[in-house]
Amino acid sequence: MKTLTRAEEQIMKAVWDVNQGFLKDIIDALPEPKPHTNTVATILKILIEKEFVSYEVFSRAHRYYPLVSREEYSKGSLNNFVSNYFKGSYKEAVSFLVKEKELSVKDLELLLKQLKKK
C-alpha cells in the first residue's frame, strides 16, 4: 500500500469522517486552523492519483468518497511500521512498548483474552 504524507493523512481522515462529501464538507471536518481551500483541493487530487479517494461529478462540483477504508490503511501502516522498525517482528514491537511503559500489564492481559477468544 502506498504511504501518505502527514498532510495527506489529515485530509484522508476528514474524508473518512464525512464518508462522502463535497470539498466544503471535507474542509468543515478538518481541525483548526483549517488549510486553504486550494490546498485541500490539491491534496484531494493527489489522493485520487494514489487511489485512496474517488469522486462523482455533480454539475461543476465533485463529491469525494474513500476507496481505502480507515481500517485497511491502519493495518497497512502498522505492518509497514513493524517491518521498518522491528524487522517485521510484532513480538519485538510489543516488547518495545512494554519496555517504554506504553503498554501496561493490564493491557497485555486484555490482549491475551482477546487472542484466546479468537
Image (cartoon, grey):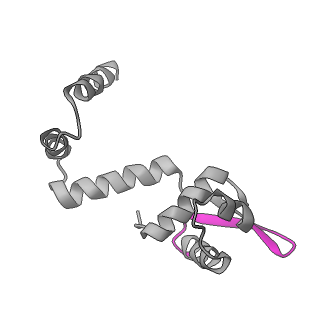
Quadrant for residue 5, please give it. Answer: bottom left
The image quadrant where one finds the N terminus is bottom left
The image quadrant where one finds the C terminus is top left
Rendering coords of residue 63 (x, y %): 75, 64
**Residue at position x 36%, y 56% in the image:** 77
Q: Is residue 86 left or right of residue 55?
A: left
Rendering coords of residue 34 (x, y %): 60, 68
**Magenta residues?**
49-62
**Residue at position x 32%, y 52% in the image:** 78
- Confirm whether the magenta stretch covers residue 61: yes
Answer yes or no: is residue 67 visible.
Answer: no
**Residue at position x 63%, y 76% in the image:** 36
Residue 14 higher or lower than 89, as above or below: below
Rendering coords of residue 80 (x, y %): 30, 58
Judge by depth and name the residue closer to the eye, 59 or 51.
59
Rendering coords of residue 18 (x, y %): 67, 53
Answer yes or no: is residue 65 visible.
Answer: yes
Residue 68 higher or lower than 102, as above or below: below
Judge by depth and name the residue closer to the eye, 89 or 36.
36
Residue 60 higher or lower than 68, as above or below: below
Q: How many labels were placed on the picture? A: 0
Q: Quick one: which residue is furthest to the front in this view?
A: 33
Q: Is residue 34 left or right of residue 103?
A: right
Judge by depth and name the residue closer to the eye, 81 or 37.
37
Quadrant for residue 108, please give it. Answer: top left
- Confirm whether the magenta stretch covers residue 3: no
Q: Is residue 79 left or right of residue 84?
A: right
Quadrant for residue 84, please give it. Answer: bottom left
